[in-house]
Image (spheres, helix red, strand yellow):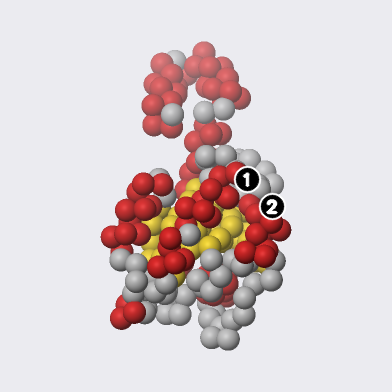
Amino acid sequence: MDSPIGGEEYLFKIVLIGDSAVGKSNLLSRFARNEFDTNSKATIGVEFQTQVVEIEGKEIKAQIWDTAGQERFRAVTSAYYRGALGALVVYDITRKLTFDGIKRWLQELDTQNDSSIVRMLVGNKCDLENIREVSTEDGKSLAETEGMFFMETSALDATNVQTAFEIVIREIYDNISRRVLNSDSYKAELSANRVSLGNGVGSKENKLGSCCS
């Protein structure tokens, strides 16, 4: 991120990870350009796009990295996970094998980032309900076990795509806001203000500490 909360510009790095052909590239193109490519080819290495989202009147730039899912690119693409504030971990609801590989993707993500990264499990291609191999309940269960958000999407018909990305972006924003509010400089400012403003500010500080710890 280029600047902390309170600055003029926010840049959040988010990665899209998961097996090849689960629809990561089309999820990104649907979110960034509202497009779907029926002839989409496998991503070679890494590509990224930037999308602007407004939260509480602030302009958030989400730099979203679409990573290759093929094994031969693993060593290269995993390096791009570093510094990510959010991740959408994607599987194809019609291919159980892609769901079974989620824990491996999460392990790779965890080796490059700390536990504060916002993670969402995404079951893509929910428009193909008639050939589903992974139930919604199984997706929810895994997400709950791993402490992740969960959503089923369709890049083809745009179901939940915007919502999935915006939930991750919003949660990153909220996490950073909480960290700033709990920072020593903010607490020092509260202490200084308490001299002139009395107990009211002290009460506010206590509330922040309890809700943001």
Amino acid type shown at disc 1: Gln
- Quarter residue 114 falls in: top right
Contact check, label 1 and label 2, Cβ < 8 Å: yes
Residue 79 — which label?
2
Work out whether 122 lies above or below 213.
below
Q: Position of residue 27 (x, y in %)?
A: 52, 71
Secondary structure category for the residue under label 2: helix
Q: Position of residue 111 (x, y in %)?
A: 60, 44
Seen at 52% across and 28% down, the residue is: 182
Q: Kindly identify which residue carries mark 1.
A: 112
Seen at 32% across and 53% down, the residue is: 141
Q: Position of residue 207 (x, y in %)?
A: 39, 26
Which badge, 1 or 2, comes first in the chain's sequence? 2
Q: Residues within 10 Å of mark 2 (few under 14, many from 20)?
A: few
Q: Quadrant of the C terminus?
A: top left
* Residue 9 visible in this rendered orientation of the protein: no
Q: Position of residue 137 (x, y in %)?
A: 28, 60
Position of residue 209 in the picture relative to residue 15 (left or right): left
Position of residue 69 in the picture relative to residue 121 (left or right): right
Q: Residues within 10 Å of mark 1 (few under 14, many from 20)?
A: some
- Quarter residue 42 falls in: bottom right
Q: Relative to the observer, which residue lies in front, 95 or 144?
A: 95
For this orientation, the residue located farthest to the bottom is 39
State the separation of the CA atoms marked 1 and 2.
7 Å
Seen at 39% across and 74% down, the residue is: 94
* Residue 16 visible in this rendered orientation of the protein: yes
Q: Relative to the observer, which residue lies in front, 105 or 207?
A: 105
Q: Relative to the observer, which residue lies in front, 163 or 143?
A: 143
Seen at 58% across and 23% down, the residue is: 184
Residue 194 — which label?
none
Amino acid type shown at disc 2: Ala
